[in-house]
Image (tube, rainbow, N blue to C red):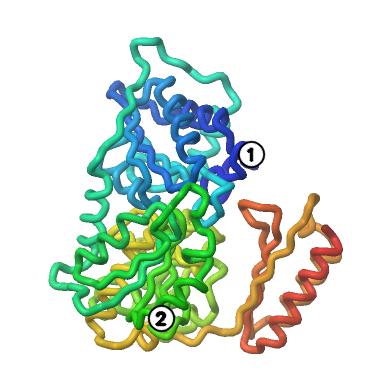
Amino acid sequence: MARKFFGTDGIRGRTNEGVMTAAMAMKVGQAAGTHFLRGGHRHRVVIGKDTRLSGYMMESALVAGFTSVGMDVVMTGPLPTPAIAMLTREMRADLGVMISASHNLFEDNGIKLFGPDGFKLSDEAETAIELLLEQEPLLVEASRIGRARRIDDARGRYIHAVKQSVSSDVRFDGLKVVVDCAHGAAYQVAPAAIWELGADVVAMGVEPDGTNINHEVGSTALDAICTRVVEEGADIGIALDGDADRLIVIDEKGKPVDGDQIMALIATRLKAREALTGGGVVATVMSNLGLERYLQGEGLTLERTKVGDRYVLERMKEGGFNVGGEQSGHMILLDHATTGDGTIAAMRVLASLVRSGRPASELLDVFDPVPQLLKNVRFSGGKPLEDKNVKACIADAESELAGSGRLVIRPSGTEPVIRVMAEGDDAAQVERVVDRICDAVRAAA
């Protein structure tokens, strides 16, 4: 069954349009609350948000929805997505909600849901909630309406958990670290956690005003932090996105390091300590072929899933893996968190930097990536991937790359865009293949 509201990472859209209105948020609260009303106990939902202006509106609407079906609400204020996942489980809540559109600009917002175990919901649970969205809500009688309150210790709880993710004998004294929080959800907690372990922290992207989240800062806009790392003479840079569930690292020379290299580093060091489980790493179809070849050389596997950290997580749980993620920077370290956590992943990288005594540019140059090119083609309607000319072009490209590269073509889960990615040992060939397919998609769109 095709889903109408949920995409690859919850419900997302432009605020005050389509699915991202206050009215819709209230319905989501009523539907999700109804789905998780199980048993006779007093039910509870934890709600967090990033720093978008629309977060106040969406939070109020969700509170109205949840309380109207009998759920109590605990609000944390701005906190990273993984912090809400953690608090949902720690506070024995029945449901967790994060109000965020991740790396998107402030005009968008989104709703991410977590079950009582702190994990993102399955496709089946989201489908069940979608069915409830199109039904009249089951409102409770006046005496059973839920209560809502804010808590003040959520930030401290999360900082403590982040610090506990590294060994007690590890300190960051002597490290100069630039931390870019994208004017987002981690603007207080990430610099604090790293500073408390001894680092000299240069914080940027920590002045949210409701409209500047992800604007020319953060993990999807790296020019500012790359420049700052070099200017400050820092040892390393840490770039988070708006809800701090992804991480891109900047070495001391100002060069970005993506999630593939970070996963390779973490997996290698865990393997050396005999602490890597599952026999390898889980990543998506977008991860570089060079990562796969490197892991094979280490006697490890790379298991690929479709795009979306929730699918990576599902495979990790099925196969007993403790390291997984995406090239874009979602790092899932199941020994420490139930979802992608950029700050905890940063802690692992900083701990490796301290233990190795090597510069970041050497430590994080784990494997040689093969040439890879990704282009996006926007379309206004229809299904261009079903066009016969597009299909023929894709088939020709797959034959051309057979044995020397890979081709990944997929529609975006959040916008009307076809993503065309190819990689292989011959950079010129990769570019030709991508351009031909993009031209065919444009002609069909």
The nearer-to-camera label among 1 and 2 is 2
Task: Tell me the element at label 2.
Answer: helix
Q: Earlier in the sequence, mark 1 or mark 2?
A: 1
Q: Residues within 10 Å of mark 2 (few under 14, many from 20)?
A: few
Task: Tell me the element at label 1.
Answer: loop
- The structure residue drawn at horizontal position 32% and vertical position 30%, both measured from the top left corner, is 44
Please state the horizontal and vertical placement of residue 431, each as a whole percent of the image. Answer: 71, 81
Please state the horizontal and vertical placement of residue 152, each as a whole percent of the image. Answer: 25, 40
- The structure residue drawn at horizontal position 49% and vertical position 35%, both measured from the top left corner, is 58
Tell me which amino acid carries mark 2.
Answer: Glu
The residue singled out by tag 2 in the image is: 231
Tell me which amino acid carries mark 1.
Answer: Lys
- The structure residue drawn at horizontal position 39% and vertical position 65%, both measured from the top left corner, is 204
- Image quadrant where residue 12 sits: top right
The residue singled out by tag 1 in the image is: 4
Q: CA distance from mark 1 to mark 2?
A: 47 Å
Residue positioned most to the left: 169
Q: Is residue 296 visible?
A: no
Left or right of residue 430: residue 63 = left
